[in-house]
Amino acid sequence: MRRFVVKVLVFVLPFFLLAITMEIMLRNIPNDYKYKAKYLTEHSKDIEVLILGSSHSYADVNPYLIPGKAFNAAHSGQTFEFDLKILKKYEFPNLRMIIIPISYFSYFAKLDGPYLCKYSLYYKLETDGGLKTLSEFLSYPLIDNVRRIINYYLKRRDENESNKLGQRIKRKESPQSLEESGIDAALRHTHKDTKYVSQNVSFLENIIQIARNKNSIVILFTPPAYRTYTENLDAEQLKAMYQITEDILKKYDNCYYIDFLKDTDFTAEDFWDSDHLNAKGADKLTRKLVSFIESVSKRRN
């Protein structure tokens, strides 16, 4: 029996050591989660305008164009749940404004998959993804981990895609076809199941309440999208998105909303894919947001 155990250990040990080595290598690859968590730890006390949300703010909102000390703390797929966790963790004592996208999927989605480990490991936030969220190695398929290691350690390509204030400015992929990506994205963002709606509304209301307690305002916006995306959205889900948002606006006097979804000022030249803007489009959207914020400020004064 003893010899059998020794043989098993001899067989298993190299794989265990390889997994440990890969985990260390993966965690040492620079990425946006690590960067933003560090930035917020060091500078949250200075931030006046906090941009939260999914890739629709991560890519589409340029903090350099927003008056005051702004930072884009959004990530791809980030839900209201993690917006709230970030807001609570770093407190932001000088906060005066939060900007959050209300996208077609915002009230219906729940974050899962490999992204969860980023919040566990780098933000030190609790997730409900189990033990594997404590490991980069366990959270991604082996082939993806090998590719990531090769890309960084051999090709010197890190996983940072944002500028110093957090906006996504680099992408691993090439620009997508506006025709093809519209149908695919609309289908991917359509949720027949509404089981996450009530908790997502609760998370968002919690954010608004925290902002109100800080004498801060919340700017909600629906980002622009190309016609191939908007034409393929489920009418009932879209209607629900607008109705829920309207109900929230009636409850909170520190919350304001503007809808850019079908804004004709945005043309094909402004889009990276059907539901994300390129740099030119992001600057255009941000300037429109700033104009809206200025009008809100005049109303409040």
Image: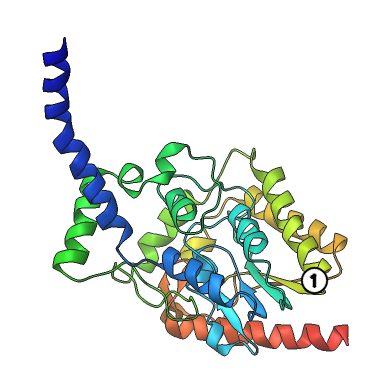
User: What is the three-letter code of the residue carrying label 1?
Assistant: Lys
**Position in image of residue 209 (x %, y %):** 80, 61
**Quadrant in the rendering for residue 208:** bottom right
**Quadrant in the rendering for residue 159:** bottom left
Can I make out residue 218 in this image?
yes
* Residue 6 to residue 137: above or below: above
Q: How many marks?
A: 1
Q: Quadrant of the C terminus?
A: bottom right
- Residue visible at 49% across and 57% down? 77
**Position in image of residue 263 (x %, y %):** 60, 76
**Of helix, strand and loop, which one carries label 1?**
loop
**Position in image of residue 106 (x %, y %):** 61, 55
**Quadrant in the rendering for residue 152:** bottom left
Q: Dot 1 corresponds to which residue?
A: 214
Which color scheme does this rendered protein use? Answer: rainbow
- Residue visible at 63% across and 74% down? 50
For mark 1, does the 10 Å Cα neighbourhood hold few (<14), some (14 to 19), or many (20 or more) residues? some
**Position in image of residue 114 (x %, y %):** 40, 48
Can I make out residue 265 in this image?
no
* Residue 271 to residue 191: above or below: below
Q: Nearer the viewer, residue 76 or 245?
A: 76
Judge from the rendering whether residue 209 lies leftward or rightward of residue 105; answer left or right.
right
Q: Which residue ends up furthest to the top in the rendered image? A: 1
